[in-house]
Amino acid sequence: MTQLDPQADSDDRSSAEAVRYGPTVADVVGRVLADLGVGHVFGVVGSGNFVMTNALRAGGVAFTAARHEGGAATMADAYSRMSSRVAVATVHQGCGLTNAMTGITESAKSRTPMIVLAADSPAAALKSNFRVDQEGLARSVGAVSERVYSPETAVADVVRAYRTAVQQRATVVLNVAIDVAASAASVEGPIDVEITAPRMRADEVSVLRLVDLITSAQRPVFVAGRGGRGAGQEIDELAAKTGALVATSAVANGLFAEDDFSLGISGGFSSPATADLIAGADLIVGWGCALNMWTMRQGKLIGAQTVVAQVDDDVSAIGAHRAVDLGVVGDCALVAADCLDALGDVADRVGYRTAEVAQRIAKESRWQDVPLDADADADADADAGAAVAAADRIDPRALTIALDEILPADRVVAIDSGNFMGYPATHLSVPDEFGFCFTQAYQSIGLGLYTAIGAAAAQPDRLPVLGTGDGGFMMAISELDTAVRTRIPLVVIVYNDSAYGAEVYHFGDADMTTVTFPETDIAAVAAGFGAVGVTVRSVGDLSQVHEWVSRYEADGWAPPLVIDAKITSDGGSWWLAEAFAGH
């Protein structure tokens, strides 16, 4: 099997007996992708991708039929992030691909290794209404465009596309013109090619300079991002030995969940205590982390005298968002391991891991521990982050804290985009980095439900939980049918303020009729799809959630639960104030 991560689960498909793949290129393309080890296929099937999709299924790859190509693309993105295996989104030519473009853009900007298997119009069909510049379209959003050129090159073309996805951590649009797909082809399989992501070792001088910076610091903080997700153990061991506190960017949330000196998420989602401790560092090391405006709060979390180092296997990422004192080009896990080797038998340092700091982290670093009437941020206005009281609406923080206690801890949390998003991101705990899926690079609302379905497919033994706003949920609601139809025991928390809350906050006293809506009974809409719908206006209304959880735990399954939470106004959430400061 080919793997994105050498530690990924092994593939059960047997390759012992040779078979003939054919009779067309479409059959070959699907079966070769299956042989290469793709983990799951999501898509909307039309005439152009019908045969290729069935060939993937015949090769043993699970398929989820989405209701919209945009949903399929983000499902595949989420699956790849949460499984360490390459997923496939399969789409029809022209309109199928254009429908999927927002999801593809998010995936490309996040550098998710993924294949978009796209039918394409024949080269000669210049006047076809299906014809668009699919190659140019893919490149315009940062994806890599590849093509199956002929029956003779089909195997090599597919292998090249897969290799690019894995080794360059890229979203690859593999175009297959329908005339080429229908061409006769017969290839002996299975295809046995080993493809793994390369791991770059940093030069010794850079490692020793990093060790010197870390051991010279009194208050070091390590911040791991997307590139550090596969290096949690090594980074954490180095932090423990050198007295560093650990934190993550949002996309790596959960990476250090078991460390008592973990600060949680660095940036706009940081609690006041977390922000204060990071800002007090005399050294910050970013491990596969961009240290951008989101993770460093427009730079406010980096003191004027703080030394900054960055470790990344992509040289173009070093210093891309701010100047750094040291850049180390290399695989995060290998760099951390080399640092430990260089330290040898040197005694463990206390550094920033003092008893006083440990006590503060235990008592104050989680948002669940911040009193509901406290300011969300010391720099914010007096009432920022404090929900406006209403007799028939629930404080989103009280809601999320209660749900964090009610819902099983073994979960995978997905987050849509919007004013609400800080609450599930900060007030719902996750077991590890595979328990949090954050498709937010493109900042599009409406991707959350798709994300949750893809993450659920990747982590089938965990309870999938989605935090979404009413705007994003209604935008994507057709995929609730997919969750019901595929029997995903999904919990959807809809933070319902009957508005696009971010705009309401951002534009203040302006005419808001374009971004506010009449109250919608989302629970009733959900019930129409076959889900369980619950309307929540107070913590007392969560009794039905308790009942649902009891059923889920007793039976190992329950139909999707949609919680229509009528939330109070928060006057603009604390994290949103940070986000808009950079606009």
Image (cartoon, helix red, strand yellow):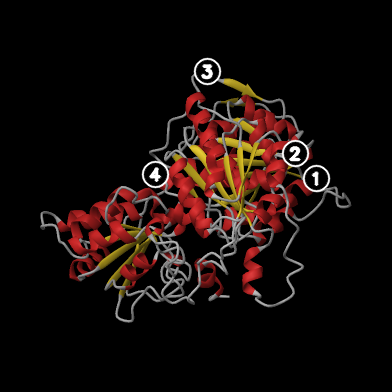
Residue pictured at 67% horizontal, 40% vertical: 480
Asked whether the beta carbons under mark 2 and mark 1 sit within 8 Å of each other, the answer is yes
Q: Amino acid at mark 2?
A: Val
For mark 4, does the 10 Å Cα neighbourhood hold few (<14), some (14 to 19), or many (20 or more) residues? Answer: some
Q: Secondary structure at mark 4?
A: loop
Sequence-wise, the earlier of marks 3 and 2 is 3
Residue 14: give x, y in percent of width and height.
49, 22
Residue 17 disc label: 3
Q: Nearer the viewer, mark 4 or mark 3?
A: 4
Q: Which residue is mark 2?
A: 180
Number of numbered callouts drawn: 4
* Neighbourhood count class around disc 3 (C-alpha, 10 Å): few under 14, some 14–19, many 20 upward: few
Tell me the kind of residue under disc 1.
Answer: Pro
Residue 217 occupies which quadrant of the picture? Answer: bottom left
Which image quadrant is residue 161 in?
A: top right
Residue farthest along the right direction in this orientation: 127
Compared to residue 8, the image places residue 138 above or below, namely below
